Image (tube, rainbow, N blue to C red):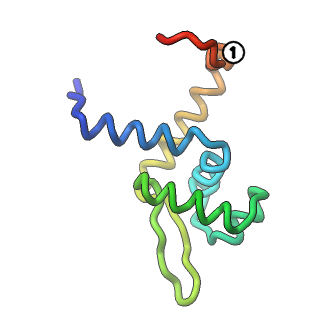
Amino acid sequence: MTTTSVASLDALARFGHALSDPTRASILMKLREHCDYPAELAAAIGVSRQSMSNHLACLRGCGLVVAVPEGRRTRYELADSRLAHALSDLHDLILVTDLVTCTTTGEEG
């Protein structure tokens, strides 16, 4: 059994925050497939370069992606290869979960 520390709960909350935005979730799913450059990610996802820059900064701050300088360009990749597997597993789990139960009802619990 894994013990849950405050630090691990904070990390889990950051992961949840990153996934709470559809654009950031799309970026993570793209980077799960292969590393890429901001301009190419922006074009593939359909957002402006400025928006992509802001989302990548958030994902870096959450510790989920890293920037790798390559000459005058910067390539982005997942911070840990295990994230690709975790994202795939989470995506598969969501596909079998009744999405209606994930709607906001205004109730806590």
Residue type, mark 1 in image: Val
**Secondary structure beneath label 1:** helix
Residue 104, located in which quarter of the rendered image?
Answer: top right
Q: Residue at point 50% right, 41% down?
A: 17
Q: Residue at point 67% right, 61% down?
A: 51
Looking at the image, residue 57 sits to the left or right of residue 6; the answer is right
Toward the bottom, the furthest residue is 71
Q: Residue at point 47% right, 10% down?
A: 109
Residue 90 picture location, percent across and down: 54, 34
Of residues 90 and 40, the one drawn nearer to the viewer in this rendering? 40
Of residues 106 and 48, the one drawn nearer to the viewer in this rendering? 106
Q: Is residue 71 above or below residue 24?
A: below
Looking at the image, residue 79 sits to the left or right of residue 75; the answer is left
Of residues 8 and 94, the one drawn nearer to the viewer in this rendering? 8
Q: Quadrant of the N terminus?
A: top left
Q: Is residue 40 above or below residue 13?
A: below
Residue 44 picture location, percent across and down: 76, 60
Q: Residue at point 55% right, 10% down?
A: 107
The crowd level at tag 1 (other Cα within 10 Å; few <14, some 14-19, many 20+) is: few
Please give the residue where the numbered disc 1 appears in the rendered image.
Answer: 100
Of residues 6 and 86, the one drawn nearer to the viewer in this rendering? 6
Residue 79 picture location, percent across and down: 42, 59
